[in-house]
Amino acid sequence: MSQHSVYIPIVSIDIPSGWDVDKGNTQSLFYPEMVVSLTWPKQCMKGYTGLHYMGGRFVPNELATSMGIDMSIYKGADSFVKLI
């Protein structure tokens, strides 16, 4: 019987498991192929070079304004936007 290796991409939601929220991948843990940040990309995503999407159109306009989040990046009824 032969063994076949299967490639399974890793997709992380918000912050990849095990990553420091501010410093990122400090322990040489896995590097996800794609990240979907919620609300706004966290500091740990700075320098990330994989596919990066942001989802979070659920943020109220008042909160987005107070946090300096530009919600106009979402087009039409889209609930996510591609960052990288």
Image (cartoon, rainbow, N blue to C red):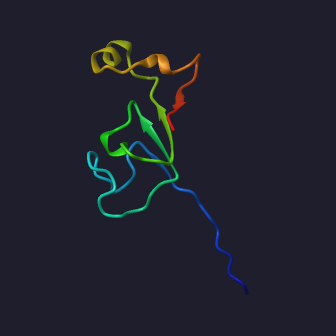
Give the total of numbered labels.
0
Residue at figure coordinates x 40%, y 51% from the top left: 16
Residue at figure coordinates x 40%, y 42% from the top left: 14
Q: Nearer the viewer, residue 26 or 62?
A: 26
Image coords of residue 27 (percent x, y): 30, 63
Image coords of residue 43 (percent x, y): 31, 40
Q: Nearer the viewer, residue 67 or 3?
A: 67
Image coords of residue 84 (percent x, y): 51, 38
Residue 3 left/right relative to 53: right
Q: Is residue 61 above or below residue 37?
A: above
Residue 46 left/right relative to 53: left
Question: Which quadrant of the figure has residue 13?
Answer: top left
Q: Nearer the viewer, residue 1 or 75?
A: 75
**Quarter the N terminus occupies:** bottom right
Residue at figure coordinates x 56%, y 19% from the top left: 75
Furthest toward the right, the residue is: 1
Residue at figure coordinates x 27%, y 50% from the top left: 23
Furthest toward the top, the residue is: 62
Image coords of residue 59 (percent x, y): 39, 22
Q: Is residue 39 above or below residue 42?
A: above
